[in-house]
Image (cartoon, helix red, strand yellow):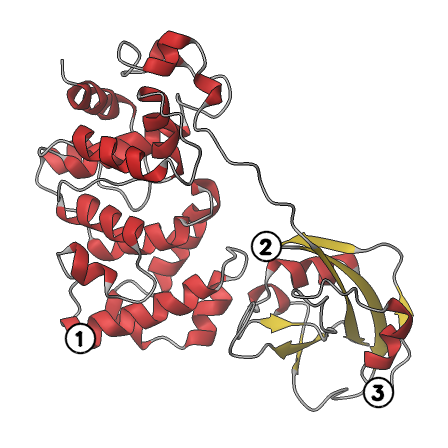
């Protein structure tokens, strides 16, 4: 039995039920994937888990059921709905992409790899995933789960990222002309279940009789990864200003840079990423908003971004003033969860609760 057939048989029995997916049974009845759903889920799933994405996907579709609705939305509303998913440039590109599809393509996704890659926020992987899953094109789709499967299947000794090229070449050979979209999703499901990073369930795997790493008994060695570079640590101070009725003072971050256009509590600059210079905690209060009496909270807020770790000291003040600063707004306890607050600033609010 061909490897692709064995995997598709397994997928027909064991596929995950996901809100953006057309099941094999429905596909057999002629139900077609919605490219809008496929694209939205793939953007959300970048560097995020399926479990975290499900509720966001359902909420987005409830608010913006079509690509036209999303294109017409206000970016601030999209950022608020995205808050907590991280990597916020994805949300801004999501909006740009929706507007491009509506304005330049009549609301329809291009059905070529080149056309898809020309859209904002869509790179090689996302273009391949949309092409395969939404349009059933026989293209090689390679995410982290698929890298692990293919590197084990062929015992590819090159370390990532150098291994990406041979992995993609092998995936292109594996991908069948029939049901390529289901095959790509089957590989994703296999990697999320049986072919796990640690202690893979090889005895249940449809590839077990062909997997070179399983035959050698060194499955957990793959994929081979280059040593990780140590992340630098930056420091800064966050100023949490609370009104006597419990409202929190928020500001909008600049339109460019890290966490662009998201909400924040007032904060100092963080350590300089080029010099590695540490923030001078002794001068923290010289950066605080004027006219308020701050006291330092015990402990620190810690958060890890893609390229650095962050340590934030938190200073808190309470005021009855209408506006402690020129730019910003009060967010009541009932409204704070709906703000476009990135996780790091939600941590600050919870830390000072």
> Which label is found at residue 104?
1
Cα distance in 3D space between marks 2 and 1: 35 Å
Figure quadrant of residue 325: bottom right
**Circle 3: is it few (<14), some (14-19), or many (20+) Cα within 10 Å?**
few
Question: Is 258 on the left-hand or right-hand side of 333?
Answer: left
Cα distance in 3D space between marks 1 and 3: 49 Å
Q: Which residue is mark 3?
A: 290
Cα distance in 3D space between marks 3 and 2: 33 Å
Looking at the rendered structure, the secondary structure element under dot 3 is: loop
Dot 1 or dot 3, earlier in sequence: 1
Looking at the rendered structure, the secondary structure element under dot 1 is: helix
Residue 331 in view here = yes
Residue 70 in view here = no
Q: Which residue is mark 2?
A: 307
Dot 2 or dot 1, earlier in sequence: 1
- Marks 2 & 1, CB-CB < 8 Å contact: no
For the residue pair 268 and 84, the one nearer the viewer reads as 268
**Circle 2: is it few (<14), some (14-19), or many (20+) Cα within 10 Å?**
few
């Amino acid at each position: 039995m061909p490897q692709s057939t064995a995997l598709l048989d397994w997928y027909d029995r064991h596929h995950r039920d996901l809100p953006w997916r057309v099941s094999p049974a429905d596909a057999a009845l002629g139900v077609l994937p919605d490219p809008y759903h496929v694209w939205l889920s793939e953007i959300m799933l970048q560097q995020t888990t399926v479990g975290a994405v499900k509720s966001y996907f359902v909420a987005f579709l409830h608010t913006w059921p079509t690509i036209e609705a999303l294109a017409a939305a206000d970016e601030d509303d999209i950022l608020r709905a995205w808050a907590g998913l991280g990597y916020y440039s994805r949300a801004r590109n999501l909006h740009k992409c929706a507007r491009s599809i509506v304005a330049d393509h009549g609301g329809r996704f291009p059905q070529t790899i080149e056309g898809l890659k020309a859209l904002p926020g869509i790179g090689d992987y996302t273009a391949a995933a949309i092409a395969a899953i939404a349009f059933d094109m026989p293209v090689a789709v390679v995410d982290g789960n698929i890298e692990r499967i293919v590197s084990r299947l062929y015992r590819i000794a090159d370390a990532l990222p150098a291994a990406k090229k041979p992995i993609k070449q092998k995936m292109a050979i594996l991908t069948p002309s029939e049901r390529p979209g289901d095959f790509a999703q089957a590989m994703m499901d296999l990697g999320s279940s049986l072919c796990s990073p640690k202690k893979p369930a090889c005895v249940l795997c449809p590839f077990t009789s062909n997997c070179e790493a399983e035959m050698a008994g060194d499955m957990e060695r793959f994929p081979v990864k280059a040593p990780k570079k140590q992340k630098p640590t930056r420091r800064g101070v966050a100023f949490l200003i609370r009104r006597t009725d419990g409202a929190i003072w928020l500001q909008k971050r600049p339109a460019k840079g890290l966490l662009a256009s998201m909400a924040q509590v007032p904060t100092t600059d963080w350590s300089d990423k080029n010099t590695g210079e540490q923030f001078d905690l002794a001068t923290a209060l010289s950066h605080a908003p004027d006219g308020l009496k701050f006291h330092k909270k015990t402990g620190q807020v810690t958060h890890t971004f893609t390229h650095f770790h962050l340590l934030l000291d938190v200073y808190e003040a309470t005021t009855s003033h209408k506006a402690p600063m020129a730019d910003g707004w009060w967010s009541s306890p009932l409204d704070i969860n709906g703000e476009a607050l990135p996780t790091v600033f939600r941590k600050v609010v919870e830390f000072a609760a």
